[in-house]
Amino acid sequence: MLNLRHPIQIIVSANLLLVLAFGASPNSSEMDHKFKLVLQGKAEQDFSVGLALGAGAAKGFAHIGVLEALEKAGVRIDMIAGSSMGAIIGGGYAAGLSVDSLSDVALNSDWLDVLNLIDPVFPTRGFIDGQKIHAFLDDLYSHKNIEDLAIPFSATTVDILNGDLFVLNEGNLANAARASSSIPIIFNPLAIGEQVLVDGGMIDPVPIDVVRSMGADYIIAVNVLALSDDNMDKPNFQYMNADELKNSRSTWRFPKANEAWYQAGKPNMVEIAHETVILSMALIAANQVELANPNMIININTGLSAWNFLEAEIAIDKGYRETLQQLEEAKQKP
């Protein structure tokens, strides 16, 4: 029997009913036409546009490029829901940070800056405490609360003990972004009472239903965990001889010339844990963006590791280009 108390089942079941009943979001054809006229400069935007910015760690820098492309196209963003890195970038934009400001933070960070944000602890619940990241975000967001933001904003987080999805829509913005991006095992989770809160991307990597619940008329979903075309073309499974398997060991060495530091010792325990979570999120996101029926889906494959925080320029550019392509297709719709 279907347990409708479980949030994943509620989300999937609701969207399946919507697909079966309508085949698309209510009035989607009308909204697509109105959005097309806005892109063509033939009408003012008299409807609300909501962004659902997805999880993806360093891949999420692509959200900056998405925001830049939407701004240049003259699209007004009226509300944002973010998960994990989508919450960090979306929260900053909602707090009034410009695309240039967000780009500066992403592009001007080196490996020392990244290391300075890491406060390792004895791993009872996570390897990284996260207080330095919270302090950094709180300064970046000018210590703002969600209810005081210029653009309505929500962040998602999950109670890892019960699988319940929680939406953070008031209180300290940095705390919300920190909770939403608490990747299990990597970061110490935040807690309230008996609830232990981790990365919202665990069950809601692209929070489409959250931004819909905020009242968005036109929803743009951004999935930065999109699988590459090569992965999509692979068979469902492949055969292998078990006799050829050997114990895996990490190899540590100094980086070679023109090689990034994170490529020198792969995979280590933290990377394995992180990539395990990211892979799970990617598979959920692929189904979620189809089932939830946003008006526009922007699937972005950055080609970068989720741990690669030092090549933000690539992710930003991929986000910008993919968004321009989707906007052009929307503009040309019959």
Image (tube, rainbow, N blue to C red):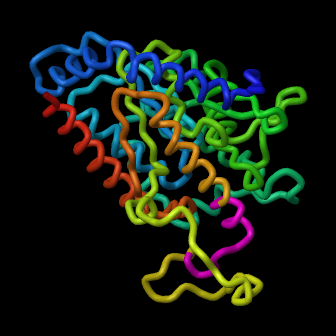
Residue 220 or 255: which is nearer the viewer? 220
Residue drawn at the location 69% of the way across and 58% of the way down: 118
> At which x and y percent is residue 49?
35, 21
Quadrant housing residue 185: bottom right
Quadrant housing residue 50: top left
Q: In the rendered view, does 148 fall on the left or right side of 119?
A: left
Report whether residue 138 is seen: no
Q: Any magenta on residue 266?
A: yes
- Magenta part of the chain: 263-275
Magenta segment, prevailing SS (helix, strand or loop)? helix
Quadrant housing residue 145: top right
> At which x and y percent is residue 106?
45, 52
Q: Any magenta on residue 43?
A: no
Residue drawn at the location 84% of the way across and 30% of the way down: 195
Report whether residue 42 is seen: yes
Residue 168 or 232: which is nearer the viewer? 232
Residue 271 or 206: which is nearer the viewer? 206
Residue drawn at the location 38% of the way across and 30% of the way down: 220
Residue drawn at the location 41% of the way across and 58% of the way down: 302
Quadrant holding the N terminus: top right
Q: In the rendered view, does 308 fall on the left or right side of 77?
A: right
> At which x and y percent is residue 281?
60, 48
In this picture, is 9 found above or below 304? above
